[in-house]
Image (cartoon, rainbow, N blue to C red):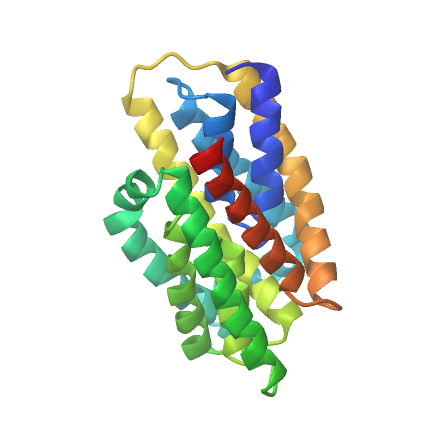
């Protein structure tokens, strides 16, 4: 991996981690196009996860600070804002499905769906799911209320992101819309819910890296991580602003177009 490849992969990760187009699916395709498959991939995956997690922390710092303070006050038996504490519980419970299924299925799903053709198929299936979410959204009321039951259900939607091509943000935003949240509330909850999972995935990759003895090309990995962080911040801001006024349809058409291009190249390229 050279510096240029590291920057390109960081750019892809930063954009696609927070847009409903599947970061894993795009990285699978990018690795195939760039012909990257070396001993540094584990370290690169670890730092990309940490870079995108840092982007979430920086962007939502005020909200995260309030939630952490709420937990500390609750542990100290001090009065707290019950709405903030309900959000903490919803995020905590919503994280459980992804942790359980991630530990059980992550490696198997990534190995199974490393084929670009399968990624293309999942891109289309995910688009159909987003279409259904838009249909439900247009024909229901949006309370904007997030409780523990809603958090748990969105957590199960998040497990769909284990399949390369589905998209973590897309699955949880669409899931939130189906459950009655507004697009903007669903997006904010989606990004906050992703933080523990992304941090956990990054920590897991780092532990795997420490136990391995593979040579690591730190310079291109560093450039990629910095790129992912900066672009991730911009992508979060873009998505939060976008869903306040627009539907998921532009992403649906993008996914279908990308899937068609991948299938065309696979069969006729």
Number of numbered callouts drawn = 0
| Image x and y of residue 193, in percent | 49, 59
Q: Position of residue 21 (x, y in %)?
A: 55, 51
- Measured as percent of width and height from the top left, residue 125 is found at 44, 60
Q: Pick whichever, 86 or 171, lies toward us.
A: 171
Res. 80 in view: no
User: Is 219 situated above or below 149?
Assistant: above
Viewer-nearest residue: 153 or 92: 153
Going by the picture, which residue comes out furthest to the front?
268
Q: Position of residue 221 (x, y in %)?
A: 53, 22
Q: Nearer the viewer, residue 172 or 131?
A: 131
Residue shown at the point (41%, 24%) measured from the top left: 41
**Compared to 119, does 193 lie above or below?**
below
46 is higher (above) or lower (below) than 174:
above
Q: Residue at x 69, y 65 (%)?
A: 243
Q: On the rendered structure, is 64 left or right of 209?
A: right
Q: Residue at x 59, y 59 (%)?
A: 252
């Amino acid at each position: 991996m050279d510096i240029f490849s590291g920057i390109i992969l960081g750019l892809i990760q930063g954009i696609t981690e927070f847009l409903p187009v599947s970061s894993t699916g795009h990285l699978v395709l990018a690795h195939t196009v760039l012909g990257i498959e070396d001993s540094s991939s584990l370290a690169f995956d670890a730092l990309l996860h940490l870079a995108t997690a840092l982007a979430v922390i920086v962007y939502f710092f005020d909200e995260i600070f309030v939630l952490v303070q709420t937990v500390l006050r609750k542990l100290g038996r001090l009065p707290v804002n019950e709405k903030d504490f309900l959000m903490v519980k919803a995020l905590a419970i919503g994280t459980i499905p992804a942790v359980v299924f991630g530990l059980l299925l992550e490696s198997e799903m990534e190995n199974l769906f490393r084929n670009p053709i399968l990624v293309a198929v999942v891109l289309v299936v995910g688009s159909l799911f987003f279409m259904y979410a838009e249909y439900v959204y247009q024909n229901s009321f949006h309370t904007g209320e997030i409780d523990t039951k809603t958090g748990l259900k969105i957590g199960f939607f998040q497990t769909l992101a284990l399949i390369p091509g589905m998209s973590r943000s897309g699955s949880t935003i669409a899931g939130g819309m189906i459950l009655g949240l507004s697009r903007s509330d669903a997006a904010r909850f989606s990004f906050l819910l992703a933080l523990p999972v992304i941090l956990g995935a990054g920590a897991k990759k780092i532990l795997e890296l420490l136990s391995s003895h593979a040579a690591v090309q730190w310079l291109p990995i560093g450039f990629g991580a910095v790129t992912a962080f900066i672009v991730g911040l911009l992508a979060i801001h873009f998505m939060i602003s976008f869903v306040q006024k627009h539907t998921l349809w532009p992403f649906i058409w993008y996914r279908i177009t990308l899937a068609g291009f991948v299938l065309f190249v696979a069969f006729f390229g």
